[in-house]
Image (cartoon, coloured by chain):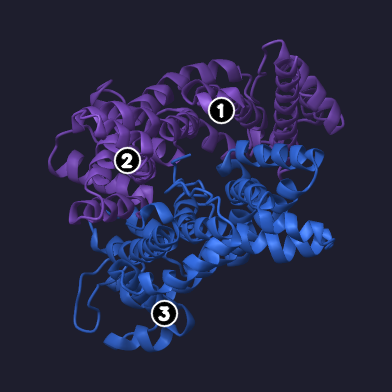
């Protein structure tokens, strides 16, 4: 009974966030200065009749709330609409997602491996020169703007050393995705490794670990089994959130490495005032965000019995 | 997003210490003494002081090598390498890189502090309301926080900057601040909730003090610490975000002088003239690193679990 109520509350919250964000985006994007019909025509003069016909077709002559209601109605029946050139937004998104998903998963995997390795080593060697060194390096990397990191990696590994392709996806996975993923992973390394380190230190001093040690369990078993399992709870939830963000598309990295992903599409759409495209992509991103936060909550409850009982 | 555009960094999760006021006061005693013994803290403080001096009075530092006018540019020197009086060479427009980098500190730091101040103010008010108010206020503010977290940041920045028209330190700082508060607000809410349950707050209630007095005198001072630590990290993240927005063409624009603008311009000629990008990048990275180092040392000094 109480669970049902909680679930209902949660779903209501979802609905509010969803409609809130989509409406704000819809409202702001459509109130941007500039006339989309005129932008479409470019330098040519369009006859008034054509302008009127286009306005009527895209409901541009109706008040904003009519447009929004109409849009949400179509959306709920699975229709994301068309952009001003008549291309389907859903089709364009579908052609871009694979690139972004591949990039996100590759970067995420590298980030997990590096983050866990650095975090565990600094926790076990805490306070030593190794811990300090890893701290300075990982945080230093996150202090450099990602585009500087990106072009430096391009020049060094792509041009000078010629190990990996400089840009584009012609070489396919994994070659073409390795360099951009590595840059994303290095940039986010500090967040993961700090989190792993912090929660491991917290657990290394817990009573149950002392008990395990007192029982004569080997150090590797204590760290590997007892400490790791409890330390991974906050890390797992952070990583889930992180994946959600990565799936939203890395605008800068996709731009630098010329990867035709969702982030790139969103940037171009905003620049070209493609309102339906902007709203369509944003809606997709919000759905991903909401799903991620749901998964994070579920994961949290699954991994930590204390939360499940509460 | 671990993307640089995120105004709030995920760097280091700051846990809310569930301690009473007495324990916090006791720890404060030794905190400063511990802090002054940390070399990383000192390095951060020195770098930040130097950058602060650049920002407040750039002229004397810029003239250090004899050519301190960042706007005295000669296109004949475009992307020129180091020469007498110009130890770091010239940028694409033929301006002295050292002078530009010294003058650039001002807008970069200003954006960082302005945006963080705005975000912190919003987060303190909303976080306290959510933590102390009833379940309705909490529910509304939590949803509002989620709305802002769910907003694609780039879109938000472009839309708001377009609405405001001008792209200067004030507007860019405003935008980064408006979208930078949700993380801090969440932290503040959790922190306020745990402090509100403490004995001294209960005692204050029993004495019949007004809610306003309880919030300002008993709850906020004890709840604000983790949020302030996240705020120090936010300053660094905002400085990085400003440069990324500028790189995408939606941040500051000339005639302003900022590290972001110099790095963005340098990145377009990086392959033929990498030296253009180096000094402003190093200055920016050093500043952010200094801020993060100070924040990290403060955290470890105040966090009882790391004291050994």
Q: Is residue A93 above or below residue B243?
A: above
Residue A262, can we see it?
yes
Where disc 3 sits, the SS reads helix
Front-most of A168 and A300?
A300
Q: Is residue B263 above or below residue B107?
A: above
Q: Is residue A270 above or below residue B178?
A: above
Position of B29 with respect to B44 (left or right) is right
Q: Is residue A297 above or below residue A127?
A: above
Q: Which residue is mark 3?
A: B54
Q: Residue at x 32, y 85 (%)?
A: B67
Task: Residue at the far top: name it.
Answer: A77
Mark 1–mark 2 Cα distance, whole angstroms, equals 21 Å
Q: Circles 1 and 2: CB distance less than 8 Å?
A: no
Q: Nearer the viewer, mark 3 or mark 2?
A: 2
Q: Which residue is mark 2?
A: A204
Front-most of B22 and B301?
B22
Q: Position of residue B201 (x, y in %)?
A: 71, 57
Q: Residues within 10 Å of mark 2 (few under 14, many from 20)?
A: some
Q: Which residue is mark 1?
A: A307
Q: Quadrant of residue A24?
A: top right
Q: Residues within 10 Å of mark 1 (few under 14, many from 20)?
A: few
Q: Quadrant of residue A46?
A: top right
Q: Which mark is residue A244?
A: none
Q: What is the letter of the blue chain?
A: B
Sequence-first disc among 1 and 2:
2
């Amino acid at each position: 009974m109480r669970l049902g109520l909680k679930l209902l509350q949660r779903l209501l919250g979802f609905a509010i966030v969803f409609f809130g964000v989509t409406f704000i985006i819809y409202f702001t994007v459509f109130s941007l200065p500039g006339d989309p019909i005129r932008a479409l025509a470019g330098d040519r003069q369009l006859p008034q009749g054509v302008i009127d016909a286009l306005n009527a077709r895209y409901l541009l002559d109706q008040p904003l709330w009519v447009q929004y209601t109409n849009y949400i109605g179509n959306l709920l029946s699975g229709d994301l609409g068309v952009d001003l050139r008549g291309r389907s937004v859903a089709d364009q998104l579908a052609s871009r997602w694979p690139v972004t998903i591949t990039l996100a998963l590759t970067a995420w995997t590298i980030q997990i491996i590096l983050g866990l390795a650095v975090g565990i080593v600094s926790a076990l060697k805490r306070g030593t020169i190794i811990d300090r060194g890893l701290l300075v390096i990982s945080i230093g990397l996150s202090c450099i703007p990602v585009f500087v990191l990106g072009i430096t990696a391009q020049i060094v590994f792509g041009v000078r050393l010629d190990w990996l392709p400089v840009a584009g996806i012609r070489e396919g996975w994994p070659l073409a995705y390795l360099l951009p993923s590595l840059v994303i992973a290095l940039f986010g390394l500090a967040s993961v490794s700090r989190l792993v380190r912090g929660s491991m230190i917290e657990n290394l001093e817990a009573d149950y670990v002392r008990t395990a040690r007192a029982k004569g369990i080997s150090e590797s078993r204590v760290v590997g089994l007892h400490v790791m399992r409890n330390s991974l709870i906050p890390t797992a939830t952070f990583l889930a959130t992180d994946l959600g963000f990565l799936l939203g598309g890395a605008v800068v990295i996709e731009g630098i490495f010329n990867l035709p992903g969702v982030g790139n599409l969103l940037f171009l759409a905003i620049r070209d005032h493609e309102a339906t495209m902007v709203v369509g992509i944003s809606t997709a991103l919000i759905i991903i965000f909401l799903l991620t936060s749901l998964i994070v909550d579920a994961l949290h409850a699954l991994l930590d019995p204390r939360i499940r009982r509460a | 997003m671990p993307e640089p555009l995120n105004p709030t960094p995920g760097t280091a999760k700051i846990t809310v210490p569930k301690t009473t006021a007495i324990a916090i006061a006791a720890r404060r005693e030794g905190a400063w003494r511990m802090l002054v013994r940390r070399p990383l803290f000192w390095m951060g403080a020195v770098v930040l002081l130097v950058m602060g001096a650049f920002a407040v009075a750039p002229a004397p530092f810029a003239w250090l090598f004899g050519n301190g006018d960042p706007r005295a540019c000669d296109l004949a020197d475009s992307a020129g390498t180091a020469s007498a009086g110009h130890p770091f060479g010239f940028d694409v427009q033929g301006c002295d890189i050292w002078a530009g980098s010294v003058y650039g500190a001002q807008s970069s730091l200003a954006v960082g502090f302005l945006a963080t101040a705005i975000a912190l103010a919003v987060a303190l008010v909303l976080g306290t309301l959510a933590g102390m108010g009833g379940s309705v206020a909490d529910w509304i503010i939590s949803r509002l926080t989620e709305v802002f977290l769910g907003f694609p940041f780039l879109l938000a920045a472009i839309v708001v900057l377009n609405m405001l028209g001008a792209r200067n330190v004030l507007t860019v700082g405003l935008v980064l601040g408006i979208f930078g508060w949700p993380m801090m607000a969440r932290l503040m809410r959790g922190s306020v909730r745990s402090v509100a349950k403490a004995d001294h707050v209960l005692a204050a209630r029993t004495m019949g003090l007004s809610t306003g007095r309880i919030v300002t005198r008993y709850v906020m001072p004890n709840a604000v610490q983790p949020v302030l630590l996240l705020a120090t990290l936010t300053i660094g993240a905002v400085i990085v975000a400003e440069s990324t927005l500028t790189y995408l063409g939606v941040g500051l624009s000339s005639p302003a002088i900022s590290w972001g603008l110099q790095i963005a311009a340098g990145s377009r000629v990086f392959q033929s003239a990498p030296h253009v990008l180096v000094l402003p990048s190093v200055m920016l990275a050093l500043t952010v690193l200094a801020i993060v180092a100070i924040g990290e040392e403060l955290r470890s000094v105040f966090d009882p679990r790391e004291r050994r």
